[in-house]
Image (cartoon, helix red, strand yellow):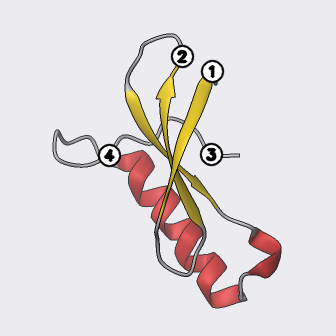
Amino acid sequence: MDLCLFVLLPIRYTGLVKLGVHCVTGKKVAIKIVNREKLSESVLQKVEREIAIMKLIEHPHVLHLYDNM
């Protein structure tokens, strides 16, 4: 994905969030960066559940999940 990172935003204990812009479309995006190696098994399961739920949801007031790596 072609992204340009700009600003580091505060977030909970699960990782970092950076504000970015998709270089092709110009849309603002939030990029959540999680170090899986530093998470406990229970927190990792919550992150994986969050990803699964976000893949299912399509709503104008909920962020769209473009990709996960």
Residue visible at 66% across and 64% down?
A: 34
For marks 2 and 4, the one nearer the N-term is 2
The residue type indicated by label 4 comes to Leu
The residue type indicated by label 1 comes to Asp
Quadrant location of residue 68? Answer: top right
Q: Is residue 3 above or below residue 36?
A: above
Q: Are marks 4 and 3 in contact (CB under 8 Å)?
A: no
Residue visible at 56% across and 70% down?
A: 47
The residue type indicated by label 3 comes to Asn
Which residue is the site of mark 2?
Answer: 23
Residue visible at 58% across and 75% down?
A: 14
Position of the N terminus by quadrant: top right
Total numbered labels:
4
Compared across the picture, whether 65 is left or right of 2 comes to left
The residue type indicated by label 2 comes to Cys
Which residue is the site of mark 3?
Answer: 68
Residue 54 location in percent, x, y?
40, 53
Q: Are marks 1 and 2 in contact (CB under 8 Å)?
A: yes
For marks 1 and 4, the one nearer the N-term is 1
Q: Nearer the viewer, mark 1 or mark 4?
A: 1
